[in-house]
Image (cartoon, rainbow, N blue to C red):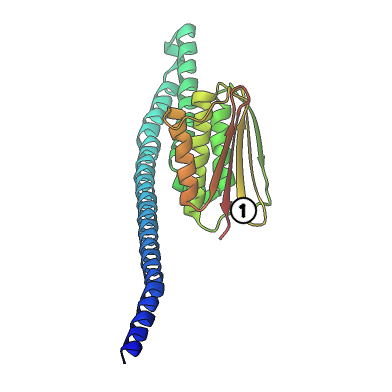
Amino acid sequence: MEYEELKTLIITSTLIFLIGPVFIFLYVSTYFKKRKKHIEEKLEMKRSFDSELLRAQMEVREQTMETIGADLHDNVGQLLSLSAVTLNAIDSDQVSIAGMEKIEAAVSLTMNAIEEMRLLGKLLQGEQLILFGLQEAIGYEMDYIRKLGIYDLVVNIDPMMRSLSDASKELILFRIMQEGLNNVIKHAQANRIELSLGSTENYLVLVIWDNGKGFLADPISERGMGLLNITKRAELIGGKAEINSAPGEGTKIELKVPYD
């Protein structure tokens, strides 16, 4: 009897000794899996929050730009037009030749200001501009830069390219392009800008290249923050931005946005 009890005790102890580590392993494994899942959920919540925050910031900025663009067109535009009409109404018989030449110059400057204001207003009112198509919107932007007279511009837009199904994505893409060009104007010290817009089977592709001084990546600098904004905005519409640059070799920004 004592032998059987001893045998049972030995078997039970052996089983506990063998099974115990398995339970400990399963417990530790489950703990780390839950911890990993918790960390992943926190990261996903942060990404989601960052995306929603960026979207909200862009909506506020877009509404502000729309308002400014409308005010330029409706208020400042009307004042400039009235100024041009008033100048044209001056009786040339009552003004000297020199005075008339100055009036004509003032009229010309006013008309140029009206044209510039209308173009700037359209660029600010991106949501309205994008209704005519992304190609048309980019054309307006490049015309505005061309008038600066300091860049050799090369623009290649595939007339057969597919548009994105979501107009809001095209608007964000347009703003990304503006951000990229703004970085060139502010920092690159370039004299040539090349822009291409086309599509592959699965992606809409935008490329901006300049022959400026280039740079080493520095996320703290103003330029670094601008490029970071480009990357974040691209992610917001499911795209990816690749930025390649080196001192003395210019900069290339390539943006790919998937079709739905």
Outermost residue, bottom side: 1
Q: Quadrant of residue 258?
A: bottom right
Q: Position of residue 49 (x, y in %)?
A: 35, 52
Residue at point 45% right, 15% down?
103
Residue where numbered disc 1 is placed: 203
Name the residue: 51% across, 30% down: 217
Looking at the image, residue 57 sits to the left or right of residue 124; the answer is left
Which one is nearer the viewer's eye here, 74 or 59? 59
Q: Quadrant of the N terminus?
A: bottom left
Using residue 18 as the reference point, say whether residue 257 is left or right of it.
right
Residue 73, horizontal then vertical, whole percent: 40, 37
In the picture provided, is 189 more to the left or to the right than 100? right
- Depth check, front residue: 42 or 148: 42
Neighbor class of circle 1 (other Cα within 10 Å; few <14, some 14-19, many 20+) is some
Q: Residue at x 53, y 39 (%)?
A: 177
- Image point (43%, 10%), residue name: 95
Q: Quadrant of the C terminus?
A: bottom right
Please say whether residue 129 is visible from this viewpoint.
Answer: no
